[in-house]
Amino acid sequence: MIRENEKMNEANENRLSRLDQLLLKEYELSQEMHNYYGRMIWEIGAIFIGGGTATIALIVSRVVAPSGTAALGSWAVTLLMIIYYLKVRRTRDIAEIHLRRCREIERELGLLQHRYVSRGGTPNGVTINDGTVPGRTDQRIRLHYPTGWATTQYLTVGLAILSYVVGIHFVWPLEIPQLISVTLGSVCIVVGISYVWKQLMHLLT
């Protein structure tokens, strides 16, 4: 009877060990996918945002308004930025799924890496006692915003609005006060559409 219990305990330990190995492998893959999507967005963004900014700068410096060609070029940048924004939003959501799975596995295995980062984004921050500072028992760290994903989206929306306003200027030449008014109006429209969209998605889900 005792030997049977010992065999059962040993089998349970081996089974748990095997499960831990599987979870660690899944943790590794989820983290790799999260990092992959982050790198991909920044690499694409370096091309799209950099190229779009260079295009707008070239149009503004070389073309005299009014010009239908310059307007079309500017609006092409606007369309490109809208498409890229949608891509960023979807990719961010996929990366967030992988990140949350990492946190689930961390809770299962008692790990802390991504959970520490998550706590660091709260108002109280995260307290880490790693013993690296003599005379101190803890170190409180609070992460500041914006995040990398938010920065990419802000840059994308900003360039989309700028190129849209530049396009309007090359169709109907405007003075600086008018350009400012159109820009502010465009920002308000974008914020309003974003708010309505979020509320609609919330109702549908």
Image: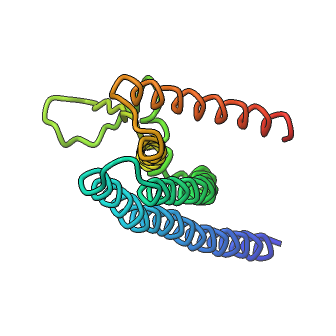
Left-right relation of 18 to 123: right
Q: Where the C terminus falls, by quadrant?
A: top right
Tell me if residue 85 comes above or below residue 123 in the rendering: below
Residue at x 28% of width, y 58% of height: 58
The percent position of residue 90, horizontal first and vertical second, equals: 63, 57
Pick the residue in front: 41 or 24: 41
Tell me if residue 33 comes above or below residue 160 in the rendering: below
Residue at x 77% of width, y 72% of height: 8
Quadrant in the rendering for residue 181: top left
In the displayed orientation, state which residue is furthest to the left.
Answer: 134
Tell me if residue 84 comes above or below residue 64 in the rendering: below
In the displayed orientation, state which residue is furthest to the right.
Answer: 204
Quadrant in the rendering for residue 105: bottom right
Q: Is residue 116 visible?
A: no
Pick the residue in front: 175 or 50: 175
Q: Where the N terminus falls, by quadrant?
A: bottom right
Residue at x 19% of width, y 43% of height: 132
What is the image's colouring? rainbow
Left-right relation of 153 to 203: left
Left-right relation of 64 to 165: left
Pick the residue in front: 176 or 141: 176
Residue at x 28% of width, y 54% of height: 57
The percent position of residue 203, horizontal first and vertical second, equals: 84, 34
Q: Is residue 55 visible?
A: yes
Q: How many numbered markers are drawn?
A: 0
The percent position of residue 136, horizontal first and vertical second, equals: 20, 29
Left-right relation of 33 to 174: right
The percent position of residue 71, horizontal first and vertical second, equals: 46, 53
Pick the residue in front: 184 or 130: 184
